[in-house]
Amino acid sequence: MKRLLILATVLTFFFGFTISANATFLTIADMIGDNDGYGYGAGVVGDGDDLPGAPLTWNFDNRSAGEMAATNGAQATDVEDNFDVTFSHTFDMSQFAYLSEAYFTIDISGVQQGVFNGFSHLYFDGVKVLPFEGLQQGAWGSDVLTYQVDLAMLADGALDVYFDNWTDPPNDDHMAIDYTQLDVTGSAVPEPASMLLFGAGLAGLGVYRRTRK
């Protein structure tokens, strides 16, 4: 222990830093869509608020030109319909030494599990998210839901989220999604400058030891 204290003192004196056991943690957030109240505006539909409902019609499409261009019309945000949809969330895995936790958040409306004799499903990389099957919002209900993600699914720096919307004509769930977001937290890979500084500290320690001899 005494030697460790001497090491810390020497590195602080000669190089202006100390070695710490506390890692630097980094969180990366990847959002698809935008938090704008399903295109009605955050002031009209806040997080978790019901949609305006009647006299508005079903199958609304409030996507902005920017959203349409960004997703090429393929991502179902700010649009209500009965189609299935896949969101692909990605992040730069090389920024992490290791991951500590990850969460998926979705602002979703219109899920009526079991009302039309069937259930809509949510999948992470092909694995069913069971709590989603208990969701009962009503036609215009909205919720912000957060689920923990198995870190083993994120080893490739991606998470595929698939919504299987229940459809049995003429009945179905008309889901609407405001946004989805993946938040990944872990220990950050040290920056090259920090590694060089650490190396310089070790070199200084070597000089110190030789001087003592």
Image (tube, grey):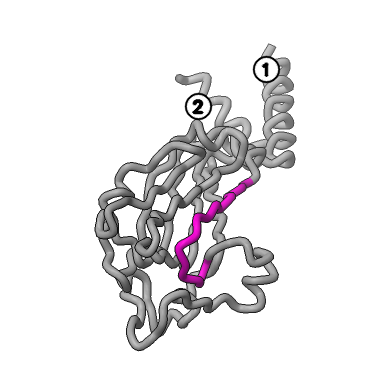
Q: Quadrant of the C terminus?
A: top right
Residue drawn at x 51%, y 46% as measured from the top left: 184
- Quadrant where the N terminus lies? top left
As drawn, 44 above or below 29: below
In the image, 40 versus 194, the foreground residue is 40
Residue sticking out furthest to the top? 213
Task: From the top left corner, tell me how far across and down residue 125 is, in percent.
Answer: 51, 39
The reply, left or right, for residue 174 in relation to residue 138 is: right
Residue at image location 58% in from the left, 50% down from the top: 89
Q: Are marks 1 and 2 in contact (CB under 8 Å)?
A: no
Q: SS of the residue at dot 1?
A: helix
Rate crowding at label 2 as few (under 14), some (14 to 19) or many (20 or more) other CA atoms within 10 Å. few
Disc sitting over residue 5 in the figure: 2
Residue assigned mark 1: 209
The structure residue drawn at horizontal position 50% and vertical position 48%, both measured from the top left corner, is 161
Membership of 79 in magenta stretch: yes
**120 or 126: nearer the eye?**
120
Of mark 1 and mark 2, the one earlier in the sequence is: 2
Give the residues in magenta.
77-91
Query: Which label number is shown at residue 185?
Result: none
